[in-house]
Amino acid sequence: MIRFDHVTFQYEKALSPALSDIDLTINEGEFVAVVGHNGSGKSTLAKHVNGLLLPTQGTVTVCGMETSNEDVLLNIRQKVGMAFQNPDNQLVTTIVEEDVAFGPENLGIDPNEIRTRVDEALASVGMTEYASFAVHHLSGGQKQRIAIAGILALKPQILVLDEASAMLDPNGRAELLETVHKLHKEGMTILMVTQYMEETTGCDRIVVMNRGKVVLDGKPEEVFQHTDLLFESNLVPPETVSVRDALRSMGYALSDKAMTAEQLAEELCPLLSII
């Protein structure tokens, strides 16, 4: 679905590239998290997926189309939906269902089809009961889910989240994550840029960036074995992973897949019953 081939990107007047010789492939239906410290290049990478930024060198291909080809850029942007940090900046009307309908209306889609798309999109993010609510009455997490519903109403194949949980409280982040995992289970390809390492444990892959380069790329249980590289990249593993590793040092035989509180409890309980 997405392929970066030797991509380098440098902002005007910057002293060094924001991305340096990136090779990365994301397959259809994958849920990939991109993590890194501030300035690592992760958001710059995300903005290349729908052509908001174009490579200084190399190519980005989305669904078989190169983003540098202006003739197909609109098609690419119809296939790639993006959600950003501040949900308030992504909402354009005052009523929930009107906001979700805004994109399809601007594409001139038949009103009956728009009604169907709005209903389906709100159902997908668990916000059907809020269809007639005023947007300003919603919480941050609810606003972000409405922003995603507006994206879904355009029928994209890929959802890119550029630190979409950064301005949300813990409850809002939990709501957003639940929605994104639901969309992934329904078959959507997800690329999630995040600064919260605990959000990555349920992904298919984690891509770790540092100084514009990919330094780690693998399944969560593989990436969290390289705590030295994570610390070098100014990243801290999820607290549950640190607890797991501490328990291992005490002699508890816990697997690499024990990365969340629930998974730790599931593996610990049989061990404790033996003791």
Image (cartoon, grey):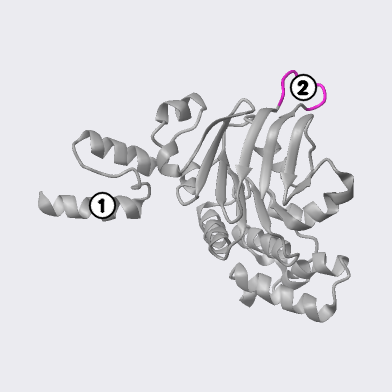
**Which percent across, then down, holds residue 259?**
37, 46
Element type where label 1 sits in the image: helix
**Which percent across, then down, holds residue 106?**
87, 65
Q: Is residue 268 above or below residue 7?
A: below
Identity, as a three-letter code, of the amino acid under mark 2: Ala
Taking the magenta stretch, the answer to whether it contains residue 227 is no
Q: Which mark is residue 191?
A: none
Q: Which residues are magenta?
A: 11-17
Residue 26 visible, this orientation: yes
Which residue: 70% across, 36% down?
A: 44
Q: Judge left or right: residue 262 versus residue 138.
A: left
* In the foreground, 73 or 198: 73
Which residue: 72% across, 73% down?
A: 118
Q: To which quarter of the image does residue 15 belong? A: top right
Residue at the front extreme of this rendering: 64
Q: Which mark is residue 14?
A: 2
Q: Judge left or right: residue 191 versus residue 12.
A: left
Identity, as a three-letter code, of the amino acid under mark 1: Glu
Q: To which quarter of the image does residue 102 belong? A: bottom right
**Which percent across, then down, holds residue 187?**
58, 62
